[in-house]
Structure formats: structure tokens, C-alpha cells
Image (cartoon, helix red, strand yellow):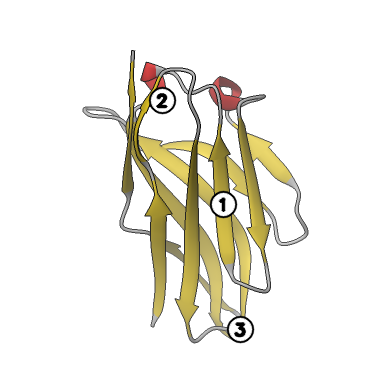
Amino acid sequence: QVHLVESGGGLVQSGGSLSLSCAVSGIFFSIGDMGWYQQAPGKQRELVATVTSDGSTTYADSVKGRFAISRDNDKNTVYLQMNSLKPEDTAVYYCNARVQVRIFSQADYWGQGTQVTVSS
């Protein structure tokens, strides 16, 4: 069993900052790419940022220069630092991890989601 547990999120004013974290626990061989996604009401889940096991990152255009993704491989944890938040960043944020649970077997796992609300 693999579990992703998110923490952080909450309510912040426009221009403020929030930090999210997501820890992977369970029995597995390794963790590959990790990422954060957002899902606003009535919209599909969208990619926010990803980080590979060696630290390479990608970002959605809407968050470039404002958000920073990072990971601690020793702690099996991925982070998302969100700065200069805007009302349009309001969404439920989900973490994702590609986990090798057996030899030659990988699967995507998701966190439970955490609400981020940015007031104008």
C-alpha cells in the first residue's frame, strides 16, 4: 500500500504565499516523477508543476515565476511554494507520485487534495 498525505493550504489574501507538502509512505522500491495539480470548481484537473527524481522541474505557464516545486528524496516528500497568489489560483491542489511498487511495475498515486483559496 502506498499513501500520499498532503498538508498546507488554506485561505490567503491576494499577493500572499502558501506552502504545500506531500509525503509518500508505504512499501515501494522508488519514487519517480512527482507533481502538483489543481482543480478549480467545474474545471478539469490541470498540471501545475512537476519534479523528476534528479530535480528537474516543469511549470504551467500560469504559475511560472510565482510557484516553486521541490522534493526531499530522503523524506519522500514533495513541496510546492506558492507566492504572489492570485484569486484564479483558487482550487483544490492534488499531489501525484509515480511509484515503483514492484520490479517493472510503476503506478500513479494521488493525495487526498487540499483546498487553496485566494481572496481578492
Q: Which residue was labeled with disc 1? A: 79
Where in the figure is residue 5, as x and y percent of width and height? 39, 65
Residue drawn at x 61%, y 81% is: 104
Left or right: 73 in relation to 46: right
Q: Are marks 3 and 1 in contact (CB under 8 Å)?
A: no
Disc 3 or disc 1, which is closer to the eye? 1
Disc 1 residue type (three-letter): Tyr
In this rendering, the answer to whether 13 lies above or below 91 is above
Quarter that holds the N terminus: bottom left
Q: 32 above or below 30?
A: above
The circle on residue 29 is 3
Mark in the foreground, 2 or 3 = 2
Q: Hey, which residue is sitting farthest top in the picture?
A: 120
Would you call the spot at circle 1 few (<14 residues within 10 Å), some (14-19), or many (20 or more)? many
Which residue is painted at 39% across and 73% down in the image?
Answer: 3
Three-letter code, disc 2: Asp
Measure the alpha-carbon separation of dots 2 and 1: 17 Å
- Residue on which the image places disc 2: 89
Count of all numbered marks drawn on residues in the image: 3
Local SS, label 2? helix
The answer to whether the residues at label 2 and label 3 have Cβ atoms under 8 Å apart is no
Residue 120 in the image, given as x and y percentages of width and height: 33, 12
The local crowd at label 2, few if under 14, some if 14 to 19, many if 20 or more residues have their Cα within 10 Å, is: many
Q: CA distance from mark 3 to mark 1?
A: 21 Å
The residues tagged by marks 2 and 3 sit, at their Cα atoms, a distance apart of 34 Å
At label 3, which amino acid type do we have?
Phe
Question: Which of the two discs, 2 and 3, labels the residue nearer the N terminus?
Answer: 3
Q: Position of residue 95 (x, y in %)?
A: 45, 53
The residue at the point 44 percent across, 18 percent down is 86
